[in-house]
Image (cartoon, rainbow, N blue to C red):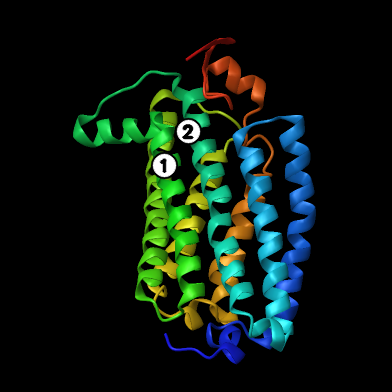
Amino acid sequence: MSTSTDSYGRLVGIEHNELPAAIVFSVIYAPLLAIYLFLSFRSPTFVWRSLAIFCLFRMTGFILRAVISGSDSASANIGLIIAQEVIYSIGFIGLLYSAYTLVLDRDVLTNGFNISTRGLLGSFVNLIRRTRTLIRLALTAAIVCSIISGVEEGNNPDDTSALNLRRASLYIFLVVACLLLIVTLVLAYDEMATNTRYGPKHGIFVLHLIALLCIVREAFLCATVSTSAQHNKAVYFYPLVATTELIAALLFLVPGIVPSRQELLGAGVRNENGRMNYGGKSRW
């Protein structure tokens, strides 16, 4: 994409008319950040901590977007625009990993550590349900691709390798979001089969909605990855990216959706130190 530095922000789709929206979203995420920080201290689990990180990145990203939108000099600063794009991109890991962790934690509370095999597909599903390290590695790879893409684009906006890395990052996020939906569907099946349910009656539908919102966000970005001006255009970006993420983040506040730390440790869910706890006893 050939660009000129005096209009780079406008060429990638960040316009003056979206300033109010960027300000509103940055303001919305401020109290959300405070709420999730409070919850992460009251009940320190990966879900709340990851959501706090997500809100911090989103608030920062929208503040930068507001600055770029409202200032022509900021719009001409390629480094600032690349920083905003990278911060916004890697911040999504907080929301996606929170959702994935929540589903897997609820899976353990529902099924314990009983692993069933339903053929090849069942074995694959059980693998992604029980091996959280694979998801962490995939998301880490997506972050690395996004950061390197930003650096390469900052050095040379016309470099096609930056686009390829950004595309790889988005596709990884999309695959993980699809896997999230799969494990959520399996959890719903297990809850019906065993007549065992954790949390509110309609909690599983909330989890499905979070997964679908993540997929909508990623599907749109993957479809428009080659045209930054399109996916950054306010008329598309705010309803299909910004709003879907915000709704998904708010859904975690549904009472009873997120298990407490005591429930997780009692059920044997892996703790923050990487150890597996069985009935309160910690083992590697």
Q: At which x and y percent is residue 202?
A: 56, 40
Q: Residue 29 lies in what quarter of the image? A: bottom right
Total marks shown come to 2
Disc sitting over residue 265 in the figure: none
Residue lying at 60% horizontally and 80% vertically, measured from the top left: 234
Instruction: Check disc 2 and give the amino acid type.
Output: Leu
Looking at the image, tell me whether mark 2 or mark 1 is earlier in sequence order. Answer: 2
The residue that appears at 60% across and 35% down in the rendered structure is 46
Quick check: can you spot residue 200? no
Is 4 situated above or below 104? below
Q: In this rendering, is residue 46 above or below 228?
A: above
Residue 137 disc label: 1
Please tell me how crowded label 1 is: few (under 14), some (14-19), or many (20+) other residues with Cα within 10 Å: few
Q: Secondary structure at mark 1?
A: helix
Q: Position of residue 119 (x, y in %)?
A: 19, 31
Q: Is residue 251 left or right of residue 105?
A: right
Residue at 40 percent across and 56 percent down: it is 174
Find numbered disc 2 in the image and state the secondary structure of the residue it sits on: helix
* Residue tagged 2: 104
Query: Considering depth in this image, is 22 or 247 the residue closer to the camera?
Result: 22
**Residue 98 position (above or below residue 62):** above
The Cα atoms of the two marked residues, 2 and 1, are separated by 16 Å
What's the residue type where badge 1 is placed? Leu
Name above or below for residue 246 compared with residue 108. below
Residue pushed farthest front?
Answer: 155
Residue 248 in sight here: yes
Q: What x and y, as percent, mark residue 159?
A: 39, 77
* Residue shown at the point (43%, 33%) measured from the top left: 132
Q: Residues within 10 Å of mark 2 (few under 14, many from 20)?
A: many
Q: 197 or 56, which lies in front?
A: 56
Q: Is residue 143 left or right of residue 226?
A: right
